[in-house]
Amino acid sequence: MIWPATKALMARDLRLLWRRRGDAMQPALLALLVVVLFALALGGEARALSKVASAVLWLAVLLAGLLSLDSLFRGDADDGSLEQWMLAPVPLGWLVLVRTFMHWSTTALPLLVAAPFLGELLHLPRNELPVLLASLGLGTPLLSLLGAVVAALTVGMRRSGILVALLALPLYVPVLVFGAGSVAAAAQGLDSTGALLLLAAGLVLALVLAPLAAAAAIRIALS
Amino acid sequence: MGREAGKGAIVSYRDYVIAAYGVFAVVMLWDFFAPHVAIRQYVRAARQRAARMAGTGKDTGFPLSRD
Amino acid sequence: MNPVVRWFHQLGSPPYFDRFSARWAPVAHGLGLLVMAYGLYGALFVVPADYQQGDSFRILYIHVPSAWMSMAVFALMATYAAIALIWRIKLCEILAMACAPIGAAFTLITLVTGSIWGKPMWGTWWDWDPRLTTELILLFLYLGVIGLYNAIDDRRSGARAAGLLAIVGVVLLPVIHYSVTWWNSLHQGQTISLFGKSHMDASMLPPLWAMVVGTHVWFVGSLLARARADNLRREAGKEWVAKLVRAQS
């Protein structure tokens, strides 16, 4: 029962995404926008930019992810599919996990691919790139999972806007700190594996706990 | 108060202490009055509602309340 | 039935809770105020000025109890929320949501007094010191709980959703603190805590304990008052409220 349901959900999400493939570019565009604005605000000088490049990139990815959170459950909440999820014989937490994975692969994965290009725009030092990609690779799924909990808490609301950002901020702080911090450590010549391992541990915990919390939140919101 | 601090930079700590204690007092006052204001508001609303309902003969305004 | 157990059950009845909180909130407020007055008097006039920090040291007597309260109230809020979610006790939902503004108030006091204390000591109004940064994030968590509760129309769903957020927050708070401490050590080398380890002389402690006890007792009063307000709001259409206001007028 679980595997056919999973395949069906993934196929549906991909089909819906294909129909609105223009929208799929929005997170990447926002990240680009953030990078450009930072570069312009900082004066465009290579030395100044390369010192903050990794942090700005992390912020760009985080903000783009934050803005795309609304689309995680909104469509299904509006047309009643979310209630079908609650009634399905498949665990609600598993459906949340599948949905979050699809959302991450369509919003965050393009960002990961674009990261080296954006890094060039900011004169990111070459030696920082591998650690940056590793931290983003571990951090973005974590952000998506934590974001899913926040999105689930606000799923019933019409205009959640700034409230989503306010709720997500405290949850995102450790991820941002260890993610951007791992690159900062690498830049200073320190070992960044500690921070990356902590991110990985957080990811493993979130893979188990976040879907449960999000499922509980959805049940509360739709009760 | 801060005059004994030394001959170099004589900093008056008094203003800072007053500011900090002032902030404490203001926030505590808010914390005391906010619920009282709210209670008065809700009681007034309930009184108006009771006056509205008095003529109609309905026993409660929430017939379908799940509580 | 055990009288204590029966009293617990009675508290769950909205009219009984209204009478209980109307009676005991002022008592707790008054008692808390007395103990805090004693503590503040001691802090301002009895305790000698610190050798290094002069009179600005007296801010500690507000800053530290507020910081402890901000954490303790958050933990209590999460506990009430967990009880409300697991056992579906309505009173615990109300109590959990009533904790939030009070905790936010104490967090705000902690941040502002910390900032005021930092200026003469370290020359700066703000420092991204791990403890202050964690307090700031704690403030955002409180505001998030309050915001979420007020944004959802149905008070019961709202309380449960905000309660879930509080539980997630209390689990993540140690992680947040650890991450910010690590980040601080990374970017600022040797961690010099803004409010180091002050070795307090025994003569300086009684006002501190008085303030700790006083703020706790005051908190109970505020909790009861705010819970009473929320209770009245939720029960607005009920017969007992109508009877109550008719009896008053």
Image (spheres, coloured by chain):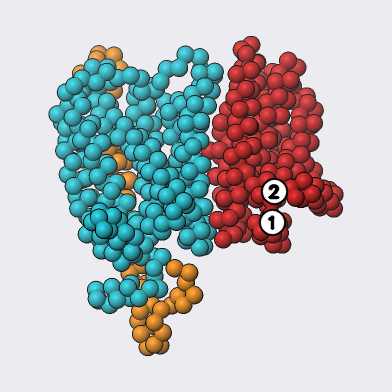
Chain colours: A red, B orange, C cyan
Quadrant of residue C25 within the rendered picture = bottom left
| C13 relative to B56, above or below | above
Viewer-proximal residue among A217 and A37: A217
* Residue C97 appears in the picture as rendered: no
Q: Position of residue C170 (x, y in %)?
A: 46, 39
| Co-location on one chain, circles 1 and 2 | yes
Which residue occupies the extreme top position in the image? A189
**Residue at the image position 68 percent from the left and 29 percent from the top:** A138
Q: Are marks 1 and 2 in contact (CB under 8 Å)?
A: yes
Residue that numbered label 1 is attached to? A88
The three-letter code of the residue at mark 1 reads Ala
Percent position of residue B65, x then y: 47, 72
Q: Secondary structure at mark 2?
A: helix
Within-10-Å neighbours for mark 2: few <14, some 14–19, many 20+: many
Q: Is residue A41 above or below residue C25?
A: above
Mark number for residue C12? Answer: none
Tell me the residue at 71%/24% (across/down): A134
Instruction: Give above or below for C23 relative to C212.
Output: below
In the rendered view, tell whether residue A83 sits above or below residue A111.
below
Image quadrant containing the C terminus of chain A? bottom right
Position of residue A133 in the picture relative to residue C50 (left or right): right
* Residue shown at 19% from the left, 32% from the top: C207
* Residue C95 in the image, given as x and y percentages of width and height: 37, 53
Residue A14 visible in the picture: yes
Is C2 or C111 nearer to us in this picture?
C2
Tell which subunit mark 1 falls on.
Answer: A
Direction left: furthest residue: C46
**Residue at mark 1 to residue at mark 2: CA–CA distance:** 9 Å
Mark carried by residue A95: 2
Task: Say few, some or many: other residues with alpha carbon within 10 Å of mark 1 (under 14 / 14 to 19 / 20 or more).
Answer: few
- The kind of residue on which mark 2 rests is Leu
